[in-house]
Amino acid sequence: MPITLVLADDHPILLDGLEAILEAEGDFKVLARCLDGDHTLKAIREHKPDILVLDIRMPGKDGLCVLREMRAAKLATVVVLLTAEVDEEGLTEAVRLGVRGLVLKELASKLIVQCLRRVYAGELWLEKQSVSHALEKLLQGEAGKIEAAQVLTPREIEVVKHVAIGLHNMEVAKRLFISEGTVKMHLHNIYEKLHVDSRIKLSRYAQQKNLI
């Protein structure tokens, strides 16, 4: 099965080149090309692609607006940003909204195929030339929180945070205003979901996902 894509950018020439690169690979299928935010959202809802390749700056609804509406609608399509320049505030917001990859347009022909395959496999791709080390760490931390939220409920994440800092079940129960038995039930479910079998391993998970 090919990796299905929707491409969104307000420059038709760029879309032509990008589609040609991807179609030549053999394992990608472009389902739609969009020149603005409204058409992008319509295409995502209609085609339900695996990945959306999205420019931040587009007429009408920009990329961030598209991301907010996708998040509100709980659309499952993964998003990769393809942009000419990086604004740290906008990029950080984009990752908080679920973006999984970033490629600069000047490097797209070399890196977009690698990025899309990695992101499709569940990885986070941030082109090193485009982000500072500090921002990269921040974005990876935000991505970790997003990953945790896809597996655990908000209450389970709260339990993980408290357990990870060394609190016993009774202390967790008092802080969250629930019974100790409820804490034990949450921990049982958390262990099963994360495939861990100890508080130490749970603490490591919390650190890796930047929950504490």
Image (cartoon, rainbow, N blue to C red):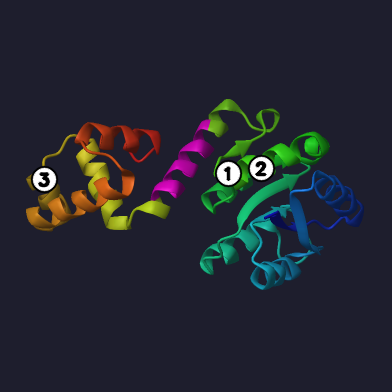
Q: What is the three-letter code of the residue carrying label 2?
A: Arg
CB under 8 Å between callouts 1 and 2? yes
Q: Residue 121, position in %: x, y?
A: 58, 44
Query: To which residue does mark 1 refer?
Result: 121
Q: Which mark lies nearer to you, 3 or 1? A: 1
Q: Residue 152, position in %: x, y?
A: 34, 53
Q: What is the three-letter code of the residue carrying label 3?
A: Asn
Q: Which mark is residue 169?
A: 3
Q: What is the three-letter code of the residue carrying label 1?
A: Ala
Task: Please say whether residue 208 is one of the residues in the magenta stretch.
Answer: no
Q: At 84% from the left edge and 48% from the top edge, which residue is drawn?
A: 18
Q: Does the magenta stretch mainly form a helix, a strand or a loop?
A: helix
Gap between marks 3 and 2 measured at Cα: 42 Å
Task: Please say whether residue 147 is one of the residues in the magenta stretch.
Answer: yes
Q: At 61% from the left edge and 38% from the top edge, which residue is drawn?
A: 125
Gap between marks 3 and 1 measured at Cα: 36 Å
Image-based side of 111 in relation to 208, left or right: right
Query: To which residue does mark 2 refer?
Result: 117
Mark 2: which secondary structure? Answer: helix
